Image (cartoon, helix red, strand yellow):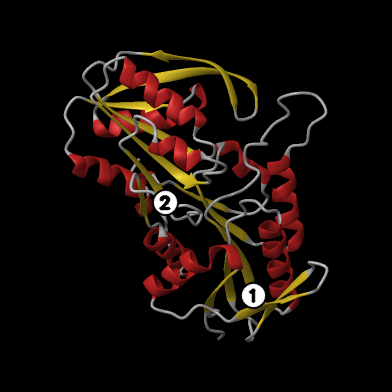
Amino acid sequence: MFGKAPMKIFSCRASMTLAEKIAANLGIELGHSSVTKFSDGEFQPCFDESVRGDMVFIVQSTNPPADNLLELLLMIDAAKRASAYKVIAVIPYYGFARQDRKDRPRVSIGSKLTADLLSTAGIDRIITMDLHADQIQGFFNVPVDHLYSSAIFAPYIENLNLDNLTISAPDMGGSKRANAYSRHLQSEMVLCYKLRKKPNVIEEMSIIGDVDGRNVIIVDDMVDTAGTLVLAADMMKERGAKSIRAFATHPILSGNSVERINNSAIEELVVTDSVPLKIHSDKIKVLSIAEMFARTIQAVNLNQSISTNFVF
């Protein structure tokens, strides 16, 4: 009778630090791999140890540049061609997720194309966290384990022991997430309504609900330019909010976003290490998702339930 396939964890370059933490939580060494670079910018990942018959987990967030996604695809292809038993893509931040539908004529649906590329490369499963849109799970024809940062954010919020707590979403799209936090924490909820001229440019914003004298926590799946977050926080402060904190899973933080946050009414921005921070700030606190992903990887390897990772 054949034994269970051994488990090995590898990482692409963009998520090496997180992958090392995940491996440490599992009590194993990160697998050895390397990347050959050509003078024109082309690169070729390589496994530096055998993966034949193994359960191979490859960790890589697919935030820009697009080389991060391409490197993951090449690693998946290499694992399949090296006769890995199964290949599981561990993608803490699933890039191109904002392109989840045709919101105007003649545009691509980037998140569906990315899913197709990963499937064609040969993944058997995907583990990810806080997708920009839940329906992206349906773009795959393989199992998707969708984790939520609420498992680490909710206990942190509870430990703050804030009175007059109010949960907010920076836009209407985040109302479901804010409502889940509000119900779990038994707090009030307010919403922000915004109109955009174009991506990353806000034309108008209004706040639905009362924040006067309240300790407000804004929850979101990601923070990119921080324009929406800062505008919402500053408006809430003007309306009498006692304090404003923000929780965002994926700290993309492009351009001068960190400077915006430093000069805003936000007292603290709490994020995860799904994406490495480009610039550090005294206002930004990072909570690690390594333990949660390690538990999930172990459960997948042992064919166990992962529902214990969910708070709500």
Q: Which mark is residue 255?
A: none
Judge by depth and name the residue closer to the eye, 176 or 263: 263
Q: Which residue is mark 1?
A: 85
Check disc 2: other Cα within 10 Å, few if <14, some if 14-19, many if 20+.
many
Q: Is residue 115 left or right of residue 3?
A: right
Q: Which mark is residue 272?
A: 2
Q: Residue at x 69, y 69 (%)?
A: 75
Disc 2 vs disc 1: which is toward the camera? 2
- Residue 193 position, x and y percent, is 49, 17
The amino acid at mark 2 is Thr
- Residue 279 position, x and y percent, is 47, 52
Check disc 1: other Cα within 10 Å, few if <14, some if 14-19, many if 20+.
some
Q: Is residue 47 left or right of residue 182?
A: right
Quadrant housing the N terminus: bottom right
- Residue 128 position, x and y percent, is 53, 52
The amino acid at mark 1 is Tyr
- Residue 88 position, x and y percent, is 59, 64
Compare marks 2 and 1 and give the one earlier in the sequence: 1
Q: CA distance from mark 2 to mark 1?
A: 31 Å
SS state under label 1: loop
Q: Residue at x 35, y 48 (%)?
A: 151
Vertical comparison of 101 with 36: above or below:
above
Q: Residue at x 34, y 13 (%)?
A: 209
Image-quadrant location for residue 154: top left
